[in-house]
Amino acid sequence: MSEIKDVTGTAFVVAEFRARENAEPHPLYVDRIVPIFLDARTKQAADAIAAGFPAAEKNVRLRTRYFDDRLDEQFANGCRQVVILGAGLDTRAVRKQSPGVAYFEIDDPNTVSLKQTRFAEERIDAPITFIAGDYVASGVFPLLEANGFNCELPSFFIWEGNTMYLTEADAMKVLRDLKARLRQFSISFDYMDKAVVARTTGERGATTFVERFAAMGAPWHYGIDDLEAVAAATGLTVAGTATIGELLREFWPGRVLDSIIYEHYSVCTLEP
């Protein structure tokens, strides 16, 4: 396997957290594919991020269920193309296939190469168009259209674990470009509020969590306090939103909210 330094370290951390839901007696989802990317080093990296802060892992597991549910809804509504921006080690194209639906995954060349290699080694076949590129620097649509994406087909964009690493201008450009180019689409993404990004929540665990990502070379820049304003500024509407705390109370009603970060971290879906 490639060294962690050759693929974004955060991708391995997220994959580790996601995989741990498989061990639950009544899992929120089942991901039998993700273990092919994991080993002792990825476990160590994930443990270092989550040390003393269980919310780090729970956030990922709950948001995975949210995006899975939205994807199922999109299939039911006739979605024909799924685009995963900054895909990392996402496995939905394998574990959630649907007849007539094509997947497009955009990420850096090292991550794309690792996924292709591991899938080939495991003889995993899936309807994925892998696109090695930087969607911020190059723009989403030049990358997609050079790889067979059809702007006329109903499409769903999953933008998981990305927004906090971008600038506000870059995040807004992604949303505006979608609105300008597509006839029928939805986009689901997660976001922290400004207090988390600025490390001003007052909770030491939340601040340490952000600092650990910065120490991995993945600092956070962008937080959202007013989702409706973001939607209005990009010509979109909010089709749904929830805090991670709300998801926790829905899916794990007997569990304690052991950090304030659950109320500062949200998932949402926007559409024209």
Image: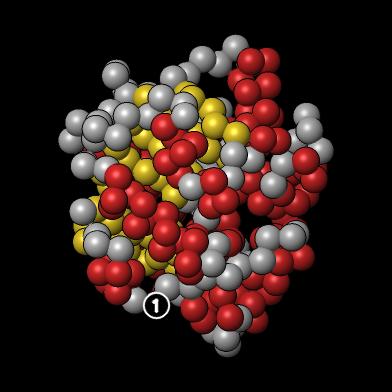
Residue drawn at the location 81% of the way across and 38% of the way down = 3
The residue under label 1 is: 225
Secondary element at tag 1: loop
Query: Residue 270 placed where, x, y %?
Result: 28, 56
Name above or below for residue 190 compared with residue 24.
below
**Which residue occupies the extreme left position in the image?**
77
In this rendering, position of residue 52 left or right of residue 33 = right
Residue drawn at the location 29% of the way across and 51% of the way down = 180
Identify the colour scheme used.
secondary structure
In this rendering, position of residue 150 left or right of residue 9 = left
Query: Residue 67 placed where, x, y %?
Result: 38, 46
In this rendering, position of residue 150 left or right of residue 190 = left
In this rendering, position of residue 43 left or right of residue 226 = right
Residue 246 quadrant: bottom left
Residue drawn at the location 67% of the way across and 28% of the way down = 113
Amino acid carrying label 1: it is: Asp
Query: Residue 175 placed where, x, y %?
Result: 36, 56
One can see residue 249 in this view: no
**Viewer-nearest residue: 41 or 236:** 236
One can see residue 175 in this view: yes
Please tell me how crowded label 1 is: few (under 14), some (14-19), or many (20+) other residues with Cα within 10 Å.
Answer: few
Residue drawn at the location 49% of the way across and 47% of the way down = 139
* Quadrant housing the N terminus: top right
Query: Residue 96 placed where, x, y %?
Result: 39, 28
**Viewer-nearest residue: 155 or 66:** 155
